[in-house]
Image (tube, helix red, strand yellow):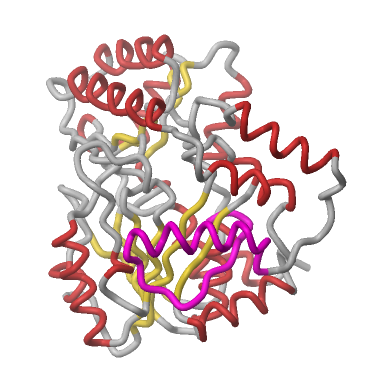
């Protein structure tokens, strides 16, 4: 009865941890990949006002003009190359549309290992072939390691900086080297920049500044706590964007109307205080863990990806669960299972409890 393509998708390991959390009375939850702050009140007010004024129907598939104009202005200021952009139902929606639009059966997509869980499963779903680029131990997806995996079937490279689950960022020079390599070979880059505001030590490096065949994707979920509002965008070459818009018309239809109105207001709302607070948490967590685990200090996002004792993440996560600490085993994000992910998008109280448990079981 079930279509065979569904066998290409496993239930998210993160959801399994959420299910476990529901069975624990007072879990210390360091597993959640979303901000621990709510949507700012001023942005909520714009959304509420839009709803009350009746802005509750379909918008143009591409998104409302004022949001697209504002996004275009922002990308041009960042010197991102693109012909057109449109508003998507979250970055996740944009990723699915890109894969469906570009990948034929057997086309290869290079994906950094560790990776955001969605890449692998959606490439498989549409009949493509995920090719995993091992980036251990520093988690850097460089031009050098990409070049080793290129074949005549390589259609796309998925790039995520800052990265989930590692928090690792690429420098401007590193993304330029990737751009130079892939531009020469006419390979598309899917640049997932959902964490572009969560940068702690440098500036956001975007491959779209240097490679015209880039689909630059960003969104509002992480920066503004709007994860449930499903609002993102994709910018890139006209030929690709027009086909993605056509596919959105017959799938997502459009992003939520009220969220688009709120998105315009959000782009002028300062979130520096929240980002500064997350940098403080990043530094605190690193200082607490560095003497107990083999761990890379993340340059962005809100994750750490430490090595598990004896490189056995399943055993370690089970040990943590016995102490009511929720973390994610590495095999959710990797073809290996030697590490685990923790999120520091949590209250200071929760972080303090979690760090104490991690030190005790190290």
Q: Is residue 124 magenta?
A: no
On screen, 18 above or below 353? below
Q: Nearer the viewer, residue 79 or 235?
A: 79
* Quadrant where the image shows the N terminus: bottom right
Q: Is residue 76 magenta?
A: yes
Please name the residue shown 35% across and 44% down the image: 165
On screen, 337 above or below 74? above
Tell me where residue 267 appears, x and y as whole percent. Answer: 51, 45
Please name the residue shown 31% across and 53% down the image: 161
Tell me where residue 318 appears, x and y as whole percent. Answer: 41, 26
Q: Quadrant of residue 252?
A: bottom right
- The stretch in magenta equals 62-91
Tell me where residue 41 appears, x and y as whole percent. Answer: 62, 26
On screen, 315 above or below 233? above
Q: Nearer the viewer, residue 295 or 230?
A: 230
* Quadrant where the image shows the C terminus: top left
Tell me where residue 11 appears, x and y as whole percent. Answer: 58, 50
Please name the residue shown 16% across and 21% down the image: 292
Q: Is residue 83 left or right of residue 361?
A: right
Q: Quadrant of residue 247?
A: bottom right
Q: Nearer the viewer, residue 256 or 125?
A: 256
State how many labels appear: 0
Please name the residue shown 18% across and 33% down the image: 295
Q: Is residue 138 left or right of residue 197?
A: left
């Amino acid at each position: 009865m079930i279509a065979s393509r569904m066998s290409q998708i496993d239930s998210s390991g993160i959801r399994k941890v959420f299910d476990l959390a529901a069975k624990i009375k007072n879990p210390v939850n360091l597993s959640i990949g979303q901000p621990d702050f709510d949507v700012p009140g001023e942005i909520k007010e714009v959304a509420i006002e839009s709803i009350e004024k009746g802005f509750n129907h379909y918008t143009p598939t591409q998104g409302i003009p004022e949001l697209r104009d504002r996004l275009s202005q922002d990308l041009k200021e960042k010197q991102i190359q693109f012909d057109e952009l449109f508003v998507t139902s979250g970055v996740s929606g944009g990723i699915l549309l890109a894969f469906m639009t570009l990948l034929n059966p057997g086309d290869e997509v290079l994906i950094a290992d560790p990776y955001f869980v969605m890449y692998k499963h959606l490439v498989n779903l549409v009949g493509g072939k995920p090719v995993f680029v091992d980036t251990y131990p520093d988690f850097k997806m460089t031009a050098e390691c990409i070049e080793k995996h290129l074949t005549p079937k390589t259609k796309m490279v998925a790039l995520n900086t800052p990265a989930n689950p590692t928090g690792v960022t690429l420098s401007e020079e590193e993304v330029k080297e990737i751009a130079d390599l892939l531009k020469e070979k006419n390979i598309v880059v899917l640049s997932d920049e959902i964490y572009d505001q969560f940068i702690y030590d440098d500036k956001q490096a975007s491959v779209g500044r240097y490679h015209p065949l880039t689909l630059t994707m960003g969104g509002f979920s992480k920066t503004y706590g709007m994860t449930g509002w499903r609002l993102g965008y994709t910018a890139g070459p006209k030929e690709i964007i027009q086909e993605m818009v056509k596919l959105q018309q017959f799938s997502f239809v459009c992003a939520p109307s009220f969220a688009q109105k709120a998105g315009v207001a959000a782009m002028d709302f300062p979130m520096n205080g929240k980002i500064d607070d997350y940098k403080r948490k990043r530094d605190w967590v690193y200082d607490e863990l560095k003497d107990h685990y083999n761990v890379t200090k993340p340059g962005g996002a809100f994750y750490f990806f430490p090595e598990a004792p004896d490189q056995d993440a399943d055993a370690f996560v089970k040990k943590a669960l016995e102490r009511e600490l929720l973390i994610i085993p590495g095999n959710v994000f990797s073809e290996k299972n030697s590490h685990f992910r923790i999120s520091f998008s949590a209250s200071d109280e929760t972080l303090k409890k979690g760090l104490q448990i991690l030190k005790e079981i190290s």
